[in-house]
Amino acid sequence: MWIAVIAGACIILIITLLFLLRATTNGTSLPLFRGLRMRRWVEPRDTVTCQRIVDDMRRVCVESVGSVPTHPMLHGDMEALGKRIVMIIYHHHKPVMFNAILKVDGIVGYEVPIFHVGLVMVVNQMKRKGLQKITILNVLLLFLNYRITTFDLTDAGRSASGLRLANDYLDNPYPNYRKPDLTPSSEQVLVAKHVILKHKPDLGVGPAISLNVKSFELENALTEEEGSAQSVYTIKDGRSKNDEINTFLMARVGDRQFVGLFCTGKAKLTSLILSVGARFIKRERI
C-alpha cells in the first residue's frame, strides 16, 4: 500500500514539475496573490510574443520613471530580448511590475552559469507594496528552467535592493554590508569584469563605465545622458529600511551621484530555498 502511495505522490510531483516547467517559460498566466497574476518567458524568440512583452515592459517603465530606459531590449532589439528571462506581474490585466534577468554569455574555462538580475520596475501606484520581492521567484525558477543547482548572480546599480538580495540570499556575496572590510575573490573579479565588458548596453550604463576591482564601485555608470533612467531614479529612491545597508552604501559610494555598485554571489538551490523558507516562517521581509 505504501509503495502505491509513494508512487502516486511521485507521479503527481513529476506532473506538477513538468507543468511548471512549461508554464513558466511560455507566458502562461499563473495566479499569485491579492489579485496578481504572473506571466513569464525564458529567452523569448517569437516576434509577435516579443513585441507584446516589450509593449508591456515599456508601459511599466513610463508609469514608473516617466520614460523608457536605454536597454536595447526595450527598443526593438529582439536578439537582446532573446537573452532575457522576463517575468511580468499583472493586476486586473494591467502590467504593474516586471523583472528581466539577463543570461550572461559564458566565460571560456569557467563552467558556472552566470545570470544578471537586470531591470526591476514597479509602477508608482504599486510601489512600497512588496512587489519587488517577487524577483526572488524569478531567480528561484532559474534552477528549474535550466536544470542547474548552482549559478552566479550579479546586479549593478545604486538601490539597496540589489545589495540586500546578494547578501541575504546568496553564498559568498560581495560587497558584503555585514563584513565591510571583506575583499573580492579572484573569481568574483573575473565574473564582474566579464559581465561589464560583454554586456554594457544590456546593463543600461554609459560606455565610459569602469570597475574598481577592490570595492566593486562602478565609476561613470549612472549618467542621465548615456545610462538608464531606472539607474538614475535608484539614486533618488534607493534607501532601505535597514540602517546597516544605508550606512554601508553611504560609506561605499557616498554622495557621488553617478557612481553605482556591482554585486555578486553564488546562488545555490538548497541554501536559497532555506533562506527564503526561514524568512517566510519568521514572517520577515523577503
Image: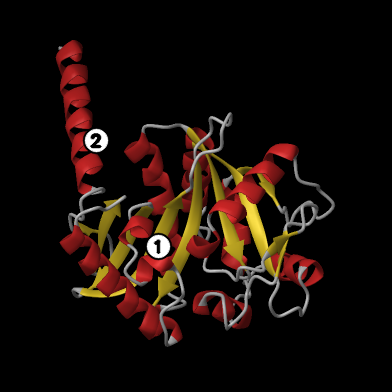
Residue ID for mark 2: 17
Secondary element at image label 2: helix
Image location (x, y in percent) of residue 248? 76, 65
Q: Which residue is farthest bottom?
A: 66
Secondary element at image label 1: strand
Discs 1/2, front:
1
From what the image shows, is residue 135 above or below residue 237? above
Is residue 130 among the parts visible in the rendering? no
Q: Which residue is farthest right?
A: 181
Residue 4 in the figure: left or right of residue 191:
left
Residue 9 in the figure: left or right of residue 270:
left
Q: Label 2 amino acid? A: Leu
* Crowding near the residue tagged with mark 1, few <14, some 14–19, many ≥20 C-alpha atoms within 10 Å: many
Q: Residue at x 65, y 50 (%)?
A: 192
* Crowding near the residue tagged with mark 2, few <14, some 14–19, many ≥20 C-alpha atoms within 10 Å: few
Q: Label 1 amino acid? A: Asn
Image location (x, y in percent) of residue 283? 49, 57
Residue ID for mark 1: 99
The foreground one among 245 and 249 is 249
Q: Residue at x 39, y 43 (%)?
A: 142
| Quadrant where the image shows the N terminus | top left
